[in-house]
């Protein structure tokens, strides 16, 4: 369950990974355009939205990596681990 940081943001917990990825790419392009336009308030608003989606994407990626590492640890359960 994600917190909605920006009033125009969506509940990211209901979105698929692909939808999040598309939104990050879309907002990245809009952010670049807002810098070119030179409107600091627009840039700030787009940056806030972009950060929300990027944070959700990174959180999901970390969770997947942790699950992958856990499953790899289980695959080598019969091997003696010498630290």
Image (spheres, rainbow, N blue to C red):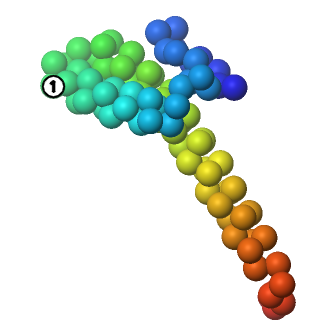
- Residue at coordinates 69% horizontally, 56% vertically from top-left? 67
Image coordinates of residue 80 in percent, x first then y, are: 84, 90
As drawn, is 46 to the left or to the right of 77? left
Local secondary structure at mark 1: helix
- Residue at coordinates 68% horizontally, 65% vertically from top-left? 69
Which residue is disc 1 drawn over? 36
As drawn, is 10 to the left or to the right of 28? right
As drawn, is 73 to the left or to the right of 24? right
Report the residue that reaches farthest toward the top.
7
Image coordinates of residue 16 in percent, x first then y, are: 52, 31
Image coordinates of residue 36 in percent, x first then y, are: 15, 25
- Residue at coordinates 61% horizontally, 57% vertically from top-left? 65
Of residue 70 and residue 41, the one placed in the foreground of this image is 70
On-image quarter of the N terminus: top right
Vertical side of 12 occupied by 9: above or below: above
Of residue 39 and residue 20, the one placed in the foreground of this image is 20
**Image quadrant in which you'd find residue 33:** top left
Of residue 4 and residue 23, the one placed in the foreground of this image is 23
As drawn, is 69 to the left or to the right of 40? right
Vertical side of 6 occupied by 63: above or below: below
- Residue at coordinates 55% horizontally, 34% vertically from top-left? 56
User: Taking the image as drawn, is residue 51 in sight?
Assistant: no
On-image quarter of the C terminus: bottom right
Image coordinates of residue 78 in percent, x first then y, are: 83, 84
User: Taking the image as drawn, is residue 53 in sight?
Assistant: yes
In the rendered picture of this protein, how many numbered marks are placed on residues? 1
Label 1 crowd (10 A; few <14 / some 14-19 / many >=20): few
**Image quadrant in which you'd find residue 49:** top left
């Amino acid at each position: 369950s994600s917190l909605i940081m920006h009033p125009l943001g969506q509940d990211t917990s209901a979105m698929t990974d692909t939808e999040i990825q598309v939104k990050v790419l879309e907002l990245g392009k809009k952010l670049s355009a807002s810098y070119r336009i030179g409107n600091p308030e627009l840039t700030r608003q787009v940056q806030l939205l972009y950060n929300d989606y990027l944070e959700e994407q990174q959180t999901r990626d970390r969770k997947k990596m942790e699950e992958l590492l856990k499953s790899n640890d289980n695959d080598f359960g019969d091997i003696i681990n010498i630290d």
